[in-house]
Amino acid sequence: MLVEKGSEIGSHTLSGAVLEPRALNELIPDWKEKGAPIHTPATKDRMLFLTKNNSIPMPHPPQMNNHGNYIVSLNNVVRWLGEQAEEVGVEIYPSFAGSEILYNEDGSVRGIATNDVGIGRDGLPKDSFERGMEIIAKQTIFAEGCHGSLTKKLIHKFDLRKDSEPQTYGLGIKEVWELDPSKHEQGLVLHTMGWPLDAFTYGGGFMYHLENNLCAIGLVVGLDYKNPTLSPYKEFQRYKHHPSIAHYFEGAKIVSYGARALNEGGYQSIPKFIVPGASIIGCSAGFLNVPKIKGTHTAMKSGMVAAEACFEALTAEEQSGPLLLTNYEKNLKESWVYKELYEVRNVRPSFHNPLGLWGGLAWSGLDTYILKGRVPFTFKHGGADHASLKPLKEVKPIEYPKPDGVLSFELLENVSRTGTNHEENQPIHLRLKQGQRPQIEHNYAVYGGPEQKFCPAGVYEYVDDEKNGGKRFQINAINCIHCKTCDIKDPSQNIDWTVPEGGGGPKYVNT
C-alpha cells in the first residue's frame, strides 16, 4: 500500500522536467502503448550565458545532451504511474499524511502513523475529529521526495549521515505558460547560467517547450547562497525580463506556479539508506544528478531495486520480523545509478572556490569532457546550507524591481496559482522548536529576517509587536506550498516542517 499526503497522486509533484526514460523503459517497456502522458521529444538543446542585457551561446556538457529524452509535466506522469500501480493491485491512499515513525522494542522500524485530523488550532478536538491510523509492515519505504519530514527523523535517529557529507540543496521555482503559437518551439530545451545570479551564487535558469503551446520556465538557486537579502522568487521574476527570455512571452498567458527544494549534494551526500524495517529511496535519499539536472530516472530506478529486494526478502522462507534490505543497498551501488553519480560527484562542489562561477565552470568542463570523474579525490561541499549566510551588516542589500503584472508578479498573486488549500482551523504545521526567540534574537537581529526572502509562498513575516514592542515572527501556514526550504535554510534551525492534515497543500497543474 502507498500513503500520499496530497489530495491525489501527483498533486504535490513539481519538477522541470526533462525525463530520461531509461528507468521507465525498464519498468514499463510499452509505456507509449499504455498512453503515458509523454508526448514531446527533446529536439533542440541550447545553453546561454547571460549578462544583464546580452547572452553568449555556450557548449553544454555531455550530461546535458537530451537526445532521446522527453519534456513532460511530471505531475501528469506521476498521476499516470499511480493509475498503472492501481491496475496491478497497489492500494493507494491519497489525503493521508504520515506524521510519525513507529518502532519496535528492539529499535527497528515497525511502520508509520498518519496524523489525527479534526483538531483545532487550540489543540482541542473538533466535531470532525478522527484518530490517525497505524500502518504496520515488515518493510516501510520512505519516498517523500527531497528533505522528507519523516525521512529526516529516520536519518537523525540512526545517524545515517555519519559517513557522508551534509546534503546541500537548491530551490527550484517554476511557472507554466501558454505561449503565442508563433513564439512556441516544441521540443526546445534551453538552459542558462549567469545573470541574474552573481558569480558566487550557484544556480541557473531553464525553459522547456512542451506540446499544446505550453512552456515551463524556472530558476534554480543553490541554498548555500550567502546574501540574506537574496530572494530566489524575485530573482526568478527579474530573470524573465532578460531580452533573450522575455520575447518568448509576448502575448502569452500564465497557467500555474510552484516551487520545491531539490537535492544537490550528489554522490558524497548520500546517507546510508537501509535500516531494520525501513529503506529510503529517490530524492529522499538524494539520487539527483546535478549536471544532468535530472533525478526522476535515478529515483525510479532506486524504487525498482528496493522493490525487487523487498520481494526477495518477503518470499525467503527464513525471513521473519522486520526486513533489512541489504540487497537493495548492494544492488543499487552496483547499478548504473551509482556509476552515473560517481562520475559527476565533483561538479557541484567545484563551485566552492575563490573564483566562484568561473572556477566551477573551468573544472566542470575539464571533468565532464575529459576526466569523467576518474580522479583519486572527492570534493567536499563546505558545510550545511543553513550555516552559509553572512550577517546583514556584511553584505550589500539587493534591490529588486517591482513586478509589472504582465511578465512578473507579486508573490501572493502567484501563490494563488498553486491551488494551495489548508484547513484554517488546525494546528500550525510549521513548528518552532524553541519558540520565537531564535527567530527574533538571531535570524532577525543578525540576518534581517531571511525567512521573508527565501520562502517562495509568503509564509513568514516579521511584523510589529504592538503588545510588547519590537518585532513578532508571524507564520501564515495557510500559504505553505510544501517546498521544505524553511526547514533547510533557517539559520537557527528552529523551524520544523511537519505535515498538516492530509489533502492540504498545493494542487499543481501541468507541473
Image (cartoon, rainbow, N blue to C red):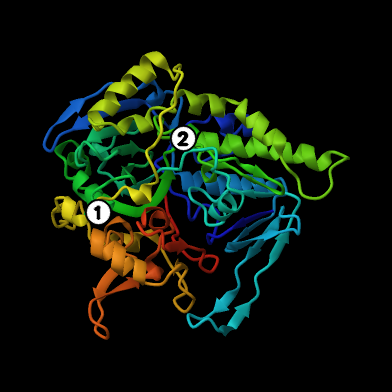
Point out which mark residue 375 bears. Answer: none
For label 2, the SS is helix
Q: Position of residue 307 (x, y in %)?
A: 69, 40
Residue 53: quadrant of the picture: top left
Instruction: Tell me the kind of residue under disc 1.
Output: Pro
Which residue is disc 1 drawn over?
228
- Please indicate whether residue 267 sits to the left or right of residue 395 in the image: right
- Disc 1, SS: loop
Q: Would residue 25 appear left or right of 318 to someone viewing this image?
A: left
- Label 1 to label 2, Cα distance in Å? 25 Å
Where residue 9 sits: x, y (%)? 55, 54
Residue 227 vs 192, above or below: the answer is: below
Q: Which of 349 and 237 is in front in this view?
A: 349
Measured as percent of width and height from the top left, residue 200 is found at 24, 38
The residue at 71%/55% (across/down) is: 107
Task: Give the x, y percent position of residue 96.
Answer: 60, 63
Residue 160 vertical position relative to residue 31 in the rendered view, above or below: below
Q: Which of marks 1 and 2 is nearer the N terminus?
A: 1
Nearest to the observer: residue 405 or residue 114: 114
